[in-house]
Every structure is written in C-alpha cells, then in structure tokens.
Image (tube, rainbow, N blue to C red):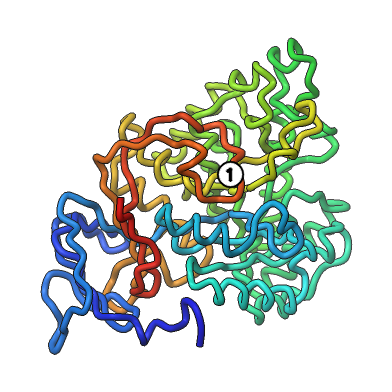
Amino acid sequence: MTGIERESETPATVIRGARVIDPADGVDGVHDLFLQNGCVAALDRAPPGFRAEVEIDARDRVACPGIVDLCARLREPGQEHKATIASETAAAVRAGITSVCCPPDTRPVIDTPAVVELIRRRAEQQGAARVFTVGALTQGLAGSQLTEMAALKAAGCVGVSNAPAPLASLLVLRRALEYAATFDLTVFLQAEEPSLQDGGCVHEGALATRLGLPGIPEAAETAALAAALALIEQTGVRAHFCRLSAARSVRMVARARHDGVPVSADVCAHQLFLTETDVAEFNALYHVRPPLRTRHDRDGLREGLAQGVLDAVCSDHQPHEADAKLAPFPATEPGISGLETLLPLTLRLVEEGVLDLPTAIARLTVDPARILGIPHGTLAPGAAADVCIFDPRRPWRLDADTLHSRGRNTPFLGWEFTGRVTHTLVGGRIVFEDRG
C-alpha cells in the first residue's frame, strides 16, 4: 500500500498541551492527544500499552481536526501547466488542509470510474492530503446526457455536480436530481442562470457601468437558486449549493431549510472579505466567478455563516499560470489560488468578532465533512488521525515566496495574518512540520 493508506505503519504520537478544539464532540480545552495506528487513540490519558515514538510539544497552540476543503481544483489531469496533484496537495497540508474535494471539471471530465481511479491513485502516490472526487452530473459536462451516477458512486465519488457548466434545461436538472436521489447521492449545484450571466465578469451595478465591464446580476444566482429549490423539494434529493455570493441567496436557503428542504450551502473565503469595489483598478486577480458583490452581500454572507445557514467555508482554489491573468479583465480566467488563505481568512473572522474560534473551526472541519459524507473532521477516539496544529498568535505576511501552490494568483499578497500552521498530520503521519 502507498501514500496515505499506510496508516497501520504510522508511529505512535502524542501531542502535548495543546488547546484541543473538536466541535464534532464539543471538546475545547487543554489536553494531551494520543494517536496510534493512524487513528485517534485517546484524549488526556494514554491507552494501555501506549508508547510514544513521536512527541509534539503543542503548548500555546491549537490542535483541531484537519481542515476539509469542499472545493479545490488540482488541475490534474489535463491542465498540469497550471498545477498538479503533487504540488497542490503539498500546499494544502502546509495550510492545515488534510482533505480536499476535487470538482468534476478536469480534462478529461470525471464522468467515468476510470478517471476517478486515476485521480485516486495519483493522490495516494503523493502521500499528502486526501483527495475526494465529485463526479459529473452529465457526460462531458455537456448538460444533456446523464452520467452513470451509480457507477461513479461505486468508484468512490462523494457526490455529483455539473460544476459551473450549464444544463440544457430544467427538465434535465429534474431527471438528474431524481436519478441522484435514487442512489442517495448528494448533488452539488452552482446556482447561476446562464441566460442572465450572459458573458458577464463582474457584479452588475453602478461600478460595472462606470468601468464599462459586462455585469452579472444578483438575479442570475437567485433565479437559478429558486428553480433548483423547487425541484429539490419535489424530488427529495440531498443537495448542496456551492459558493453563494448574494445576501438574498442566504435568506432563500434559510427559508427553504425552515420548510424542511434538505439543502446545505457554502461560501468562498474571499467572498467574506472582498467586494465589487476591489475591481475598480481592473486588477484581474479579483476576477472570480461568482463575482464579488456589494458590501451588503458580503455582510449578509458573514451573517449567514455565523447563523449556520452557510454550513462551510471553502477555498474554491483555482491555481493559474501567470499568463491567465494578463489579458484585459473580461478575457482573463476567473479564480483565486486559495488553499493557503483558507485558514488565515477564517481566523480573521474570529479577530473581527464574526465567529468564535470553535464555530470557525467547525465551518472548516466537521461541517464540510458532513456535507461530503466522509468520516473526517473529528478527533473522536477511533477517527482517522488527521490533525492541524497552529499557533494562533503567530503573525506572518503572505508573499509570493511564502506561497507553495503553483498558482500565485491571489489578491491577498501583502496581507498580514495572525495564526500559522506548525504541524499537519494525515492518518497519524506528520506530512508537514514548520521548522522555521
């Protein structure tokens, strides 16, 4: 066996004196954490016969479950000129991320078990973060012919999605939701009505008009969201809305949940800090999809996250080569390299009083793990020993030379952060240790 599967060969490890925060079990206090055979063995008291081979002094640090990222494009297979599974999973573990979820818009598309197996094997060979895959909803993401969802589930896919690609009609969406419900598959939906998106690249409003840039109205998201909610309620499928950007969308999800519709939702970390005004200098590093919206929307997203209407924060990691951001703004490729700012930005929400620390960690660990239906995001005895240890008081600056992703396309270069990962363990093995 290779990579992350060699958990039975991992050394017995004790993490001493950390503030252990495990929202899944309601743990928040200073404890010793014992790891054995790739699993969490005990809290505070060593299990019988335990002999530590590795000891980590984590006093004045936080130990929490490894971060689970709901959306990270690793660019392999098909776009290795941008990044690879090796480069991006190595960057992930340096950021405390132990599980990443890869959407289906690889090249070739994840629409057959063979592509799922290819990604699984390459991820295992790297021995860094765990990689989970979301299968395609339609063949080739073309929007018309449904994939063999049962086969994709059997191959290991945690759900199905059409990524940002449009579907041919609401009838196709209905049939897809019915098919997914039959096999108890979660459908991951990106709410965007293509006829309203209409080639836009920024939020539709006064700023877009002044800049002369084509806009994407809030209604492109809310109209698609309303249609999907109606079909979700009719089919009973378990659905997750990815990367919401509008305050009105949050209210719609809250209403649907109140009515018993089985939906969850997430938000990108960058949407919680940036707004449409950041685009004013035509800097393509701020070109994202969905677009950055108003301050009102940003505040609504923050409120939704605090209230639990938005279940998780994801990176929406999209590494690009430098040339992808050098054309005129509308012609550049959207997306931010976000793995290494996922935890720091979420910790900044704690600094700003939006979330308390246990809630912030929950939105990065147990909550996304529940959405994916994977047995991670917890430090309960018997769980996989995926652990993130960080120094909550350590200041640092994000610079090009501190980024480890192949993608340098982030608007957060030069930002000062507080809270730095010092150790990451996957299956009980130390896969990153900050020796600086």
Binning the other alpha carbons within 10 Å of mark 1 as few (below 14), some (14 to 19) or many (20 upward) gives many
254 versus 123 height, above or below: above
Residue 168 showing in the rendered view: yes
Q: Whole-percent x and y of residue 27?
A: 22, 59
For badge 1, the amino acid type reads Ser
Query: What is the total number of numbered labels drawn onto the structure image?
Result: 1
- As drawn, the residue found furthest toward the top would be 210
Residue at x 30% of width, y 36% of height? 395
The residue sitting at 30% across, 67% down in the picture is: 379
Which residue carries the number 1 mark?
337
| Residue 396 in the image, given as x and y percentages of width and height | 35, 37
Q: Where 157 sits versus 341, above or below?
A: below
Where's residue 211, x and y in %?
74, 14
Q: Is residue 164 left or right of residue 14?
A: right
Residue 227 or residue 403, whichever sits in front: 403
Q: Tell whether 64 sits left or right of 88.
A: left
Residue 310 lies, with reference to residue 382, above or below; the image says above
Residue closest to the eye, 304 or 35 = 35
Answer whether residue 341 is visible to the viewer in this image.
Answer: no
| Residue 147 on image: x %, y % | 80, 70
Hey, which quadrant is residue 331 in on the image? top right
Q: Residue at x 48, y 56 (%)?
A: 92
- Res. 234 image quadrant: bottom right
Element class at badge 1: loop
Residue at 56 percent of width and 57 percent of height: 88
